[in-house]
Every structure is written in C-alpha cells, then in structure tokens.
Image: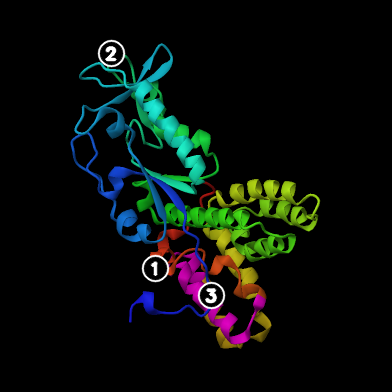
Amino acid sequence: MNLAQVEPLLPYHFPKPKIAISDCLLGTECRYNGGHAQYDFVRYKLAEFVEFKRFCPEAAVIGTPRETVRLVDINGQVRVIGPKSGSDYTEGLQDYTDKKMRFFHKQAIDGAVVKSRSPSCGLDRIKVYRPNGEWFGSKDPVDMGLFTKNLRQQFPLIAIEEEGRLQDAWLRENFMLHIFAAARWREFALSQPSVAQLQAFHRDHKYLLLSKNEALYRQMGPLVAQANAVNFDAVLTEYAALFLAAVATATTRGKMINVVEHMYAYFKDRLGEGEKAFYQQTLAEFKLGIVPLISLMKVLEQWIHHFGSEYLATQVILNPYPAKLALRSSINAYRDFKSK
C-alpha cells in the first residue's frame, strides 16, 4: 500500500498554492546556453500540490541561447548589460517584468521559487559590476536580480526562495508552511466568510501562529473578538496583514517545542507514567536533534484519536501541508536561529 491510498484519520483540506517559478527549474531549456536547471523537488514532488506560474525574463527578451548578462552600475543606476556585445537589455527586461507582475497580481500568487545566481532572477548577493567589468568584492555592491527585486517590492509578504536555499531542510519547511498558510487564507478570504467562520479560522491556526510569531498572534485575538457585521471588512483586511506577516516569520525549534508542550498539556492528566516518560524522552531527543518533529506529532495525534479533543483535532499545525512532502521527517527541519 502506498501513501496515496492511506486515508487520513482526520479530514484535512490542502489548498493549492499558486507559485511563480523560474521556468528553467521545471526542466524547460531556456537558459543562456540552451540548457535547463531542473530542480527535481519542485518538478517531481511539489508540482503535484501547487499551481505553477512560469516565467523567464531573459529567454523572453533576449532569446535562447544567448549571451550571458550581468548587473552593472552605470552612473548610480543598475543596468542589465551583455558584456560581450555591450547591449543594454534593461528596458526590455523591465517591460516583461511589469507585464508579469500585473499577471501575478491577477492570479494572487502565494509564493515564488527563483533561479539562484541569476542577474534577473537571483534572490540574494547578485554581483553589481563596474562599467569596466571589474568587481572588487566588499568594495562593490550586491543586489537582487531585476525580476526578483520587482517581485519582492510588489509582493512583500509572499514566500520567495531560490532553489539552492530550498535544499536546506529548515528553509524548505518554513517555505512550505508559508505558502500553504497563505493559500489557505486566500481561499478563505474569497469564500465570503462570516464572523463565526473567521473565529473558527483563527482558532484552528492558533498553534501554527504560535510556532511562528506569538506577538502578532496576540494582536490578532482581540481583533477577531471585536469583529461584527458592521466592521467585518475592515477587520478582515487588518487580520490578513497580521496573518501573512506572522506566517512569514521563521519557525524555530524552541517555538515548536513550546507549541508541542501546550498541546501535551491537554492530555497530561490522562496519561500513565509510561506514556509520560515516552513523551518526555521523545521531546528530549527532538531538542537534541536526534529525532524529527514527525515523531512528536504522531504521538500527539495518537492521543487525539484515543482520548478525543475537538479543539486539537482541527489544529492546522498537525498537518499544515500534504504528508507526501515528508518535510518533518528530517532532523534538520528545525533550528534555533531567529531569522532566515
């Protein structure tokens, strides 16, 4: 029996995040040399659960194959230049970018995966050369690629990652939590919800939000409590901003341990000494990075099914994304760093 045939003990609905993606990462031969940069995780695993919105600025404007391009500081303005021909492709790339940004707004994207080290798509530390072609490390600036810089400016709260960074289990886990939470909110907001449904949404995301940003979570509670038919639209707008800011925060091992301990408290008085000892041992091993988070979550789920807890049964933190992605099976999926 494979995992796709296993029915979950609790009903979970997973929204389909809309993800902008550099086309070469899906195997399209659109790179400067006529090749691709296929990333198997997104093409063969993630593709089953998301809706991709492809883009490739350089292929659309310059063609494939093409000369390589770089970011160049010309009189204080960053331009995209082909060093071999001296051609300035900035205007064409910006025009393509503007059109794609309008398309992404219409699509209401939830995240993006971009090609690393690309002068158009790179997320971080893209070299900005001098007009003579030199770059002197710390003496010269670095920037985002032109397209991704526009993407971050237009969509400040969506999850954006490079394929190289997604090979890090912790960054991948945070990215997945972010995009599926954002997609869940998008679906919810479009469903013309009632005040009661907002209250239920907030309740079901309690422990996910606590694993992200407790300070923002504490602001959201009073906002939901004051919602009524008169102010509901304004409350939804404010809640959306807080929710998306919260899920954009990195989850750490310490914050997740706090969440697990809160959930454990629901069952503590009904457990035998052996069960308590097993939980404490598993928790200690998670703290030390010996076992992955899934070990703790399965213990909690077992108690939910055995003892019953309507409140915990609907908590999104138990299954925030499809189990087939197997992200919580890695001991490296959690760290104690405070930010990405």
Pair 3/2: label in front: 3
Q: Position of residue 117 (x, y in %)?
A: 32, 36
Which residue is situated farthest in the top direction here? Answer: 75
Residue located beneath label 1 in the image = 324
Q: Are marks 1 and 3 in contact (CB under 8 Å)?
A: no
Q: Amino acid at mark 1?
A: Lys
Kindly state the secondary structure of the residue where label 1 is placed.
helix
Q: Are marks 1 and 2 in contact (CB under 8 Å)?
A: no
Residue 169 among magenta residues: no
Q: Nearer the viewer, residue 52 or 289?
A: 52
Residue located beneath label 2 in the image = 132
Q: Amino acid at mark 2?
A: Asn
Is residue 254 depicted above or below 337 in this figure?
below
Question: Spatial distance from mark 1 to mark 2, Cα to Cα?
Answer: 50 Å
Which range of residues does the magenta coloring cover? 284-310
Is residue 122 depicted above or below 325 in this figure?
above
Q: Position of residue 89 (x, y in %)?
A: 32, 22
- The residue that appears at 25% across and 16% down in the rendered structure is 86
- The residue that appears at 35% across and 32% down in the rendered structure is 120
The answer to whether residue 144 is visible is no
Q: Residues within 10 Å of mark 2 (few under 14, many from 20)?
A: few
Q: Nearer the viewer, residue 187 or 339?
A: 187
In the picture provided, is 334 more to the left or to the right than 130? right
Q: Are marks 3 and 2 in contact (CB under 8 Å)?
A: no
Pair 1/2: label in front: 1
Q: Earlier in the sequence, mark 1 or mark 3?
A: 3
Residue located beneath label 3 in the image = 11
State how many labels appear: 3
Q: Amino acid at mark 3?
A: Pro
Question: Dominant secondary structure of the magenta stretch?
Answer: helix
Q: Within the image, what quadrant is residue 24 found in?
A: top left
